[in-house]
Amino acid sequence: MDQNSAPNLILVKTALDKLFDDATIEQAVACKATALDPILFTQTTANNAAVNSSVLGGGGYFQTTTDDVPLVPEANLAAAALKTSLVYQFLQNMPIARTFMADQQLDAVSKGVRQRAMAYTASRDRKAFSVYALGFTTQLTIDGVALFSNSHINENNDTVDNLETGALTDPNLNIMVNSLRTQVNQAGVIIGWEPKKLLTPSILHQTGLAVSKSVLRAGGANNDLNYFSEMYPGMEVMYSPFLDGTSTTAYFLVSSTNGIMRAEREAFFTELVDWKTQPNDQYLYKMRAREVVDSIQYDGTVGSSGTTS
């Protein structure tokens, strides 16, 4: 095969991309959370190197009237100070010797591509789930406090608590669910958030499934129905191995359209550079992606450090 012509270069790139895609698909495991999950991360796009976010409060509950005239003047929407989230780039270059291509020694090349596919998805998810892992400490929201905190101040000037400490048990999960249901949004309105995902570290996933998905109440001596499996059969119990390194006890309840954002600037893409332009007669398989994950506001989330029973 003549490796000097442009069409062959395109064909080789296509073959490498297919290997990458196949390896990525094989990593999809039931209940394993990824950065692409639309509930755990509200998905959006970025238009440049940074995303500037704000939240709007004011308004509150709708007024009721019998004569078309509001009882009090409408409150003005108040914009919080901007939070700037910088877009970061994932990048790696894979050198491939010209002779490997020329001699069809593609087995070693395919192994290298598969390894890099696993490394990319791991890198992407590790970065994304650091938002949850650090949510009790250094991961802040637009109000300047930790993502999971008992001292959030919303735009209606309410103090909001989305932090719990109890271990993952039936009673403590009930506390978490109630906290989510009664949480007020930026305008001071009880939206009635409902849990869509229970996110745990890998080591806690079995416990999460037992507590929330057992037919009967987990760990109980009586034949009580399990409230969670009856009320929320569609609530997924997800895990991420990238939470275990920070805490093996923390867990999180997440509702839809929450305040944790993933903004994609450039989806993962590749480029195969011809060996004729590279030193050492090597092709260069370039892999790139640009995105940012950040916590803009607390809305729709509750976290427990799981440090007390």
Image: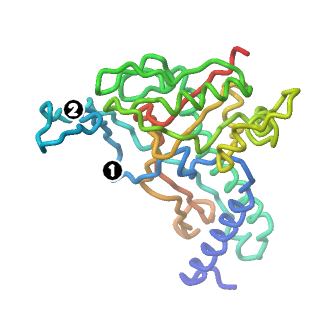
Query: With respect to residue 146, does 231 lie above or below?
Result: below
Residue for point 70% across, 43% down = 237
* Relative image position of residue 236 (x, y in whole percent): 67, 47
For marks 2 and 1, give the CA distance. Answer: 26 Å
- Mark positioned earlier in the residue sequence (2 or 1): 1
Q: Mark 2 points at which residue?
A: 78
Q: How crowded is mark 1: few (under 14 residues within 10 Å), some or many (20 or more)?
A: few
Residue for point 23% across, 39% down = 64
Q: Mark 1 points at which residue?
A: 48
Residue for point 69% across, 16% down = 307
Viewer-side residue, 152 vs 18: 152
Relative side of 208 to 304, left or right: right
Viewer-side residue, 174 vs 111: 174
Viewer-side residue, 128 vs 303: 303
Relative side of 93 to 169, left or right: left
Amino acid under disc 2: Ala
* Residue 61 location, quadrant: top left
Q: How crowded is mark 2: few (under 14 residues within 10 Å), some or many (20 or more)?
A: some
* Relative image position of residue 108 (x, y in whole percent): 79, 63
